[in-house]
Image (cartoon, helix red, strand yellow):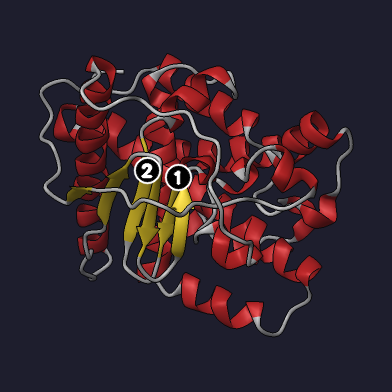
Amino acid sequence: MKWFGGSESNDVEEGSSGGRGLMFGGGIIGLIGGLIYMFTGVNPAQLLNVGQDNAQQINTQPGNGNESREKQFARVIFEGTTVVWDSLFTTMGKQYEHPVLHLYTGEVDAEGCGYASSATGPFYCPQNQKVYLDLSFFDELKNRFQSPGEAAGAYVIAHEVGHHVQNLLGVSAKMDEARNRLSETEYNKLSVKLELQADFYAGVWAHYINKSHHNNIEIERADIDSALNAAHQIGDDRLQQQYQGRVSPDSFTHGTSAQRMYWFKKGYDTGDLRQGDTFATRDDLL
C-alpha cells in the first residue's frame, strides 16, 4: 500500500488519561478482553455497562520509531477518508462534518462515551464525533488476528469513519431509539446491520481512493485481499468459535466473516452508496 507523501490530517489529537480503564466481564467478552466489540459504533462500556479497573495492555512505547511511522500512517489515511467523504457528501448535497481522530496510549476518557483502554480496540464515539485509536492495535491485527499489512489498518480506520458517516446520516440516532424498545436479541440483529454498513462504507472509501489516488494513497489488489482477510479474521462466528468453542448467532453484533467480507467488497466494487442499505436487507440474505 502506497501512502508516503500524502497530506496528514489536522483533525487529529493525542492524549491519554490515567488511573482508570476497563475490566470486561465473563463470557466471550472477558476471554478476549472486549476485542469482539472493537469495531462497535460506540464505546463498549456504554453497550455493556461494565465495571472499571485496570486492563492488561500491549503498547508501543512513546518515541519508538514504529510509533512515529504509525502516527504518520494514521494521519494520512484519516485525511484520505476526509477527502473522499467531503466529495461524496457534496454530491449528496450535504456537508461533511469532519470527525476527529484521537490517538492515545493505554487508556482514555472518551467524553460522552466513558473510559476505554487499549483492550477495547478502536471505536467511534457519536457524542463527540471522535474516532479513538491506540496505535498498539496495529500489533493486535498482526499478531492476534493474523492480519499483517498496512491495508488492514487502513480498513480499521475507514470502518470507524463509516460509523461517523452513519451518525451524520441519522442512523446512529435511530439505533439509540431502537435500543430502548427491542430485546437484546433483536437489537443485536440491528447491530450486525450497523456494522456491516460500516464495512460497506470502508469499501466505498477504498473504491474512490483506488479510483483517484486521493491524498497520494494507492491501493493495490493485494491490499484489498489484506483488508478482506482482516474482515474475515474478526467475524463474530470465527471469534466465538476460537475463544468459546461454539457459535451463538443470537449474540452476533458485527456479522460473520463471510458477511463482513461481502459488504466490504460490495462497497469496493460498486462505490455506490445506494447499494449499502444493509437495514433493508433480510436477515437471511445478509
Spatial separation of the CA atoms under disc 1 and disc 2: 5 Å
Residue at x-position 68% and y-position 54%: 253
115 to 82, vertically: above or below: below
- Mark 2 is on which residue type? Leu
Q: Amino acid at mark 1?
A: Pro
> Which quadrant would residue 94 be assigned to in this image?
bottom left
Which disc, if any, is residue 133? 2
Q: Say what secondary structure mark 1 lies in.
A: loop
Label 2 element class = strand
Query: Residue 30 versus residue 42: which sits nearer the camera?
Result: 30
Residue 204 makes an appearance in the image: no
**Residue 8 locus on image (x, y percent):** 13, 37
- Contact check, label 1 and label 2, Cβ < 8 Å: yes
Q: Position of residue 185 (x, y in %)?
A: 80, 66
Residue 97 in view of the camera: yes
Q: Residues within 10 Å of mark 1 (few under 14, many from 20)?
A: many
Q: Is residue 94 above or below residue 32?
A: below
**Which one is in front, 85 or 146?**
146
Where does residue 160 sit, x and y in percent of width and height?
Answer: 42, 49
Residue 156 image point, x, y percent: 44, 38
Residue shown at 86% from the left, 41% from the top = 247
Q: Earlier in the sequence, mark 1 or mark 2?
A: 1
State the residue position of label 1: 122
